[in-house]
Amino acid sequence: MIYISLKNFTVLKVCSISQYSLFYPYSDNILELILPKLIDSKYQASNSKFDLVKITPEIMPSSFNIDGKTDKKYKNNTHSQNFVDAKKNKGKLSKKKRKNADIVNNEDIFTPKQDHFLMDDQDNLNISLLKSRKSKKKDKELSGAIHSNNQTFEENTLNHLDKKVFIDCALTVEELSVKLKMHVAEIITYLFINKSISITINQLLDISIAKEVASNYGFHVLHSNVNNQRQYSASQEHLISSNNIKRSPIITILGHVDHGKTTLLDAILNANLVQKEPGGITQAISVHEVEYLYNSIAHNLVFLDTPGHKSFKSMRIRGAQVTDIALLVVAVDDGLQPQTIEAINYIIQMDLTCIVVITKIDKLSSNLDRIQQDLANYGLLSEVLGGNTPFVHVSAITGLNIDELLSKICIISDLKNFVADADSLADGIILEAYLDKKQGPISNLVIKNGTLKLGDIVVSGNTYGKVKSIQNSSGKKVNFSRPSSIVQVLGFSVTPQAGNHFKVFNSEKEAKKYALSISHVNIFHDTLKSLNMRVALADNNLVKQFRLIIKADTQGSLEAIIDLLSQVSQLKVQINIISANFGSISNNDIELAIATDSVIVSFNISITSQINALLKKSNILFKNFDVIYDLFEYVKTSMLDLIDPEYEKKFIGRAIVQAVFRMNKGIVAGCLVEEGKIKKSCYIHVIRNKQLVYEGLLISLKRTKNDVDEVIAINECGLMADYDLWENTDIIEAYELISQEKIL
């Protein structure tokens, strides 16, 4: 048993920290420790809460003595005494040894784990170190072990003082605890005690309060994330080796909506893709391969078509990440638009090889010079103006200059000499992912390097699995796939995150080790959290909530839906997304909708007759859409329906009460209209002594016992309202209510 004196320290209750138990049975400044840790007293924690002093027989409290025997009044605490008794019964220690075990050395100090001054469990000194020393050799070994542990301890402490964290979005308490490497309970306790905020583990913290929590615990909050692992870094490009082979270029088509991207691809493929798209707009990344003969050599070209609507930003970013050549499509009759500029930013930031394609050239227009100048202002200078960016003017309708465009792509491909090591383990990007109700998690992968084979162990983020099926862009199942291939793979244990990097390992053991090293917290999309109610430092006004369960066909579609909804103002109605996922509607979704009184909306989902019957039986409001903007408009309309009607009051007249009559139907105010007119069902203010005493709708209006629609000035009338405290000389102001258009 060891006793330590602490100054200015109060223990409120008995607590347990790992295997270290703290009791407080003796006096105002004495702690009893079971299995304490011994570390070097040379280290003094500058920010420790404990003021530690050495114990000597001269200052030892009279309530106990140093041989471990206590007064009778403290016999209730027998745990540590039993520990000493057990050692006595063994008869293996001498009296001198027992004293060495019970009396703390003057150089030992207590360091609490809660303040980051306990070593890790693997560094804990074994209780055997408290036994008597048998030789000088063991003394040296023990001293060396303690010195080594202290060195590591001091290094960890110094690192602790230079902590950095990146916070750029709302976080749940659990996500913040992972970022700060702290226990959830500590954050909850801090908010409750210091901010009077009662919060649960899954509630959202606003950016400001999350940053304040981090700052309180000594973290330096960064303004930019230098460790963004979502970006496919250039450092992951593979060095040229003797095993490298020429690979097909990946060409991504970027540009604004309705600028003719899919129509251009139709002209290249001799297909009719536009007619197959719901609503005539592209809502997903599509992959197409074409073989083009240039200089008598067949060139295999892989095209990615990306959506142009602003909500599909995540898809465009993934397309830009995997591309070798970017086709920037600009319609001659529309010029540069927001998504055109967005695509230009990707091209500049990622240093992509680019060809500018001016479409709809069959429409006579004088905009060519202006478009060239606008692009030059953004850093894309055409070859005509002395730059190095190729410009091709095409007409997808007539097929004009389509061959010229394909020839330029082949020339650039030959000049760039895109190569990869086909013999290495495959790696690349998760382009898209979704859950198939029959097969399970399906992933569309872009293989940047190596060869992917059946049976490979593939890892992405913290999920892994064995490749069971590979399907190429033509829909044919294959046994392996080489670099630049975009394939559909079945094998992940759970659906991986679209946009993440994937890699293949030699063994399941290596794959599992890598997956476990990745944080288990899956932040699906920052904007998803921005839609839900959160805890903020400022008081939030109570607003109505529109509870929503969203089901989509793929991750990319779900990202686009969430991005659209995040643009809706939520000052009057708050979107509360109960669940957002991809895949078919399940019984769990229906039960969740019933429990939370939520609406279910889905995108490109087919439901079974059984689920449809269950939805109707449960009276759940369910809507399915195949055009994402129809879903968006439905949600906006539903939110508007929750808003109370708003009116503008227009002054129409004034009257004064001259007499009050009690009738069977209520109290009637006999009035004289002094100004304007009084109308039936108008809105009135009753003013007495310049104070508003009532406001509401007029129920009845009479003139000479006849019901009338209005009474004009300098006429008498009788009126009734939901008010019976009329007094003579009350002033009645009449207003006409003009309905206002509802806005969010």
Image (cartoon, rainbow, N blue to C red):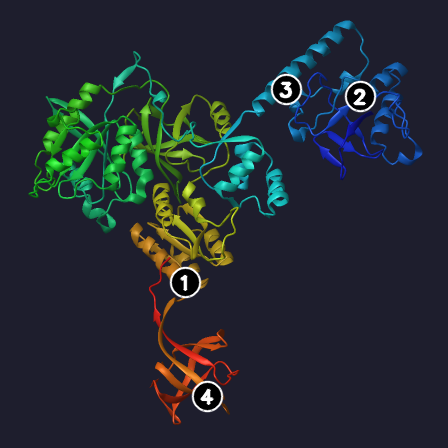
Give the number of the mark in front: 3 or 2.
2
Q: Mark 4 or mark 3, which has the lower sequence index?
A: 3
Q: Amino acid at mark 3?
A: Phe
From the image, tell me which residue sits under label 4: 658
Using residue 435 as the reference point, say whether residue 265 is left or right of it. Answer: left
Q: Earlier in the sequence, mark 4 or mark 2?
A: 2
What residue is shown with label 2?
54
Q: Mark 3 falls on what kind of element?
A: helix
Residue type at mark 4: give it.
Answer: Gln
Crowding at dot 1, Cα within 10 Å, few <14 / some 14-19 / many 20+, comes out as some
Q: Are marks 3 and 2 in contact (CB under 8 Å)?
A: no
Residue labelled with disc 3: 153
Query: Residue 494 is drawn in which quadrant?
Result: top left
Within 10 angstroms of label 2, few (less than 14), some, or many (20 or more) residues? some
Kindly identify the amino acid type of the residue bearing the numbered disc 1: Ile
Q: Name the residue tied to disc 1.
A: 643
Q: With respect to residue 436, does 166 lie above or below?
A: above
Q: Nearer the viewer, mark 4 or mark 2?
A: 4
Kindly identify the amino acid type of the residue bearing the numbered disc 2: Lys
View extreme (right): residue: 72
Distance CA(mark 2)–CA(mark 1) = 69 Å
Indicate the position of residue 602 as horizontal and vertical percent values.
37, 52
Query: Which SS class for mark 2?
Result: loop
Earlier sequence position, callout 1 versus callout 3: 3
Question: Considering depth in this image, is 216 or 299 the residue closer to the camera?
Answer: 216
Q: Position of residue 294 (x, y in %)?
A: 12, 24
The one of 437 and 216 positioned closer to us in this rendering: 216
Q: CA distance from mark 3 to mark 2?
A: 22 Å
User: In the rendered structure, are the residues bearing label 2 and label 1 in contact, judged by CB atoms less than 8 Å apart?
Assistant: no
Element class at badge 1: loop
